Image: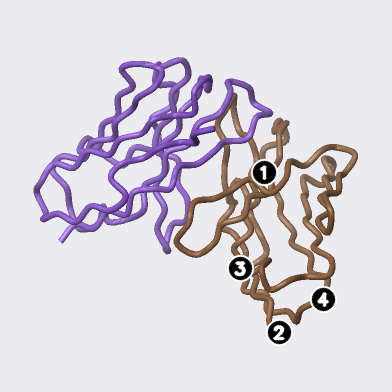
């Protein structure tokens, strides 16, 4: 089993749609969780941290379920500019982060 | 504020040559990470340093790869001799030394070994 597994992509959605990404992780001792965004041929950039109580940042909502070792990202009212690859990231030991393979999102007009 | 700075941005070289990639982390960050990204394998952690000391190099593919961090503001990743299968994008990232801190990435070095 991979340490971090994400939904296979790509997701092709129309503008304005709501889209959800899921991610599972194998290390029950993990304490920190993040969603990163990576545009084509660019570096990964932090989108948001994921907190135990769930958190929201504008159109983006992240949820964590420790019992099921599951993380989700919800994007509401998707924009063309949301098109990117979304990476689920989990800390493993100390400062080491494990990145999922990523899920590609394509938002169409 | 300056982010993580990597050089060169692009490198094309022939098989067998030595390649040196450079990274300057964000000032004040204690941890530095080297990653490699390919279509097939995604983003892989090669090695990371904490306070200039290598902590985990289990991701380094083989002895041809080596990394150093002589001071808090500079790190190198060296491949000698290079092979075509080393072609990838190499990212450097830095963070504050805490397990709940995110990492900030440089622009990456696109390496092509012919």
Mark 2 vs mark 4: tell me if same chain.
yes
Q: Earlier in the sequence, mark 2 or mark 4?
A: 4
Disc 4 element: loop
Q: Position of residue A29 (x, y in %)?
A: 71, 30
- Looking at the rendered structure, which numbered label has been put on residue A26? 1
Mark 1 and mark 3: span between their CA atoms? 22 Å
Percent x, y of residue B96: 58, 23
Q: Residues within 10 Å of mark 3 (few under 14, many from 20)?
A: many
A66 or B91: which is nearer to us? B91
| Chain identifier matching the purple colour in the rendered picture | B
Given the image, what chain letter belongs to the residue carrying mark 3?
A
Vertical relation: B19 (above or below) B74: below
> Which disc, if any, is residue A16?
4
Mark closer to the chain start, 3 or 2? 3
Give the secondary structure at mark 3: strand
- Marks 1/2 in contact by CB < 8 Å: the verdict is no
- Please name the residue that numbered disc 2 is placed on: A109
First reached walking from the N terminus: tag 1 or tag 2: 1
Contact between labelled residues 4 and 2, with CB atoms less than 8 Å apart: no
Mark 2 residue element: loop
Q: Are marks 1 and 2 on the same chain?
A: yes
Give the quadrant of the N terminus of chain B. top right
Chain represented in brown: A
**Marks 1, 4: nearer the viewer:** 4
Task: Give the spatial CA distance, label 2 vs label 4.
Answer: 9 Å
Give the labeled residue for mark 3.
A104
- State how far apart marks 4 and 3 are (Cα): 17 Å
Structural crowding at the residue carrying mark 2, measured as other residues with C-alpha within 10 Å and reported as few (<14), some (14–19) or many (≥20): few
**Chain of the residue under label 1:** A
Q: Chain of mark 2?
A: A
């Amino acid at each position: 089993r991979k340490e971090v597994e994400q939904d296979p992509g790509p997701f092709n959605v129309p503008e304005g749609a709501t889209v959800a990404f899921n991610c599972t992780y194998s290390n029950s001792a993990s304490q920190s969780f993040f969603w990163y965004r990576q545009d084509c041929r660019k570096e990964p950039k932090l989108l948001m941290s994921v907190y135990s109580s769930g958190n929201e940042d504008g159109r983006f909502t992240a949820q964590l379920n420790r019992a099921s070792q599951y993380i989700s990202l919800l994007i509401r009212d998707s924009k063309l500019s949301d098109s990117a690859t979304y990476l689920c990231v989990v800390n493993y030991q100390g400062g080491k982060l494990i990145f999922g393979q990523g899920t590609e999102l394509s938002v169409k007009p | 504020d300056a982010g993580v700075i990597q050089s060169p941005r692009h490198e094309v070289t022939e098989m067998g040559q030595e390649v040196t990639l450079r990274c300057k982390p964000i000032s004040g960050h204690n941890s530095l990470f080297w990653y490699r990204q390919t279509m097939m394998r995604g983003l892989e952690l090669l090695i990371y340093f904490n306070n200039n000391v290598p902590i985990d190099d289990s991701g380094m593919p083989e002895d041809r790869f080596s990394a150093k961090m002589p001071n808090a503001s500079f790190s190198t990743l060296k491949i000698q001799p290079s092979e075509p299968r080393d072609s990838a994008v190499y990212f450097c990232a830095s963070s504050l030394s805490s397990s709940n801190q995110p990492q900030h990435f440089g622009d990456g070095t696109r390496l092509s070994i012919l």
